[in-house]
Image (tube, grey):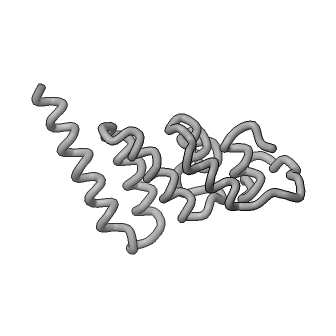
Amino acid sequence: MHSTLTEHARCLYGDEYRPASPCGPDHHEHYFLEELTFADAEAILAMLRELCPNLVDGFLPVWVRNLAYRLVLLQRPDEPALMREAAYSLYSHGPDWDDRAAELRSQADALEGRCQDK
């Protein structure tokens, strides 16, 4: 068993910065997805930042990154910096997500504008 979401992801997908810990034979991706689904924003961000410190590197699959950012933004909907980080991640994985990335950046700009008006 893994003690953190980061360790679980490292075991499944590898890490270009540190070696992965050996896992038991009952290690399956669906257990990781279940853990990710119910993880708090801090645990998800820790995983993303440790395994992909430069946003475009690391071995996490694109779909895991997209899901992770989506889950973080659901938990922290009013953080423009996180919206921009998620948008940058989407931009870096091809044009399929460019419209969604632009939408996130626009939402971040609007949210920041509302905060400055107060």
Say above or below: 99 vs 16: below
- Left/right placement of residue 96 relative to residue 49 reads left
Q: Give the x, y percent position of residue 81.
A: 35, 40
Q: Give the x, y percent position of residue 31.
A: 70, 55
Q: Quadrant of residue 102?
A: bottom left
Q: Quadrant of residue 104?
A: bottom left
Q: Considering depth in this image, is 102 or 30 the residue closer to the camera?
A: 30
Q: Give the x, y percent position of residue 24.
A: 88, 53
- Left/right placement of residue 101 relative to residue 51 reads left
Q: Seen from this angle, which residue lies furthest bottom?
A: 96
Locate the C terminus by quadrant: top left
Locate the N terminus by quadrant: top right
Residue at the (55%, 64%) spot, across then down: 62
Q: Seen from this angle, which residue lies furthest left?
A: 117
Say above or below: 112 vs 96: above
Residue at the (21%, 40%) spot, across then down: 111
The total of numbered circles placed on residues is 0
Say above or below: 56 vs 82: below
Q: Considering depth in this image, is 48 or 30 the residue closer to the camera?
A: 30
Residue at the (86%, 52%) spot, across then down: 23
